Image (cartoon, helix red, strand yellow):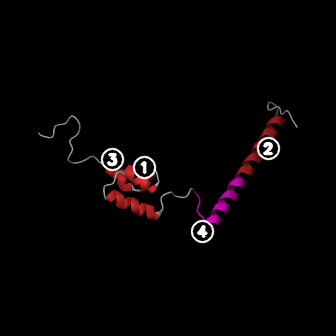
Amino acid sequence: MQEHIDATTPGGRLVFHVFGALASFERELIQERTLAGLAAARERGRRGGRPSVLSPAKLRQARKMIGEKTPVTEVAQVLGVSRSTLYRRVPELGEARTRPAMNEPEAGVSASP
């Protein structure tokens, strides 16, 4: 069915407004139901989102290997995760990477006064 609605007339504008109001109402109902469903799932102990690749045991192993000064790339390969996962889940890695070394002079700056 193809009805031509002339939006330049008062009746056409009314029809557009009614359709818009109905669409908005339907969207809000869907949103309410979705939020209620998520809350009910949380009460049953369900969590949303993608499962973590890095289990608590793997995270402990990663921290141990990093403490032994194993390169991040090697740690990632051994655990079967990406380097970015390690940097995201092991905050100490990011801090060490962004913190400048205290004993190394910056490029172009002499170490002696």
- Whether residue 47 is situated above or below residue 5 in the rendered picture: below
* Residue 93 colored in magenta in the image: no
Sequence-first disc among 2 and 4: 2
Residue 26 is situated, as x and y percent measured from the top left of the image, at 75, 51
* Range shown magenta: 28-49
Front tag of 2 and 1 = 1
Callout 3: helix, strand or loop? helix
Q: Which residue is mark 2?
A: 18
Residue 7 is situated, as x and y percent measured from the top left of the image, at 80, 32
Q: Which residue is mark 1?
A: 83
Count of number-bearing discs:
4
Callout 1: helix, strand or loop? helix
Q: Are marks 2 and 1 in contact (CB under 8 Å)?
A: no
Residue 62 is situated, as x and y percent measured from the top left of the image, at 39, 59
Task: Indicate the amino acid at tag 3.
Answer: Thr
State the separation of the CA atoms marked 2 and 3: 56 Å
Badge number at residue 104: none
* Residue 47 colored in magenta in the image: yes
State the separation of the CA atoms marked 3 and 1: 15 Å
Q: Pick out the residue farthest to the bottom.
A: 44
Q: Which residue is mark 4?
A: 45
Sequence-first disc among 3 and 1: 1
Q: Pick out the residue farthest to the right.
A: 1
Q: Nearer the viewer, residue 31 or 5?
A: 31
Residue 39 is situated, as x and y percent measured from the top left of the image, at 63, 64
Sequence-first disc among 2 and 3: 2
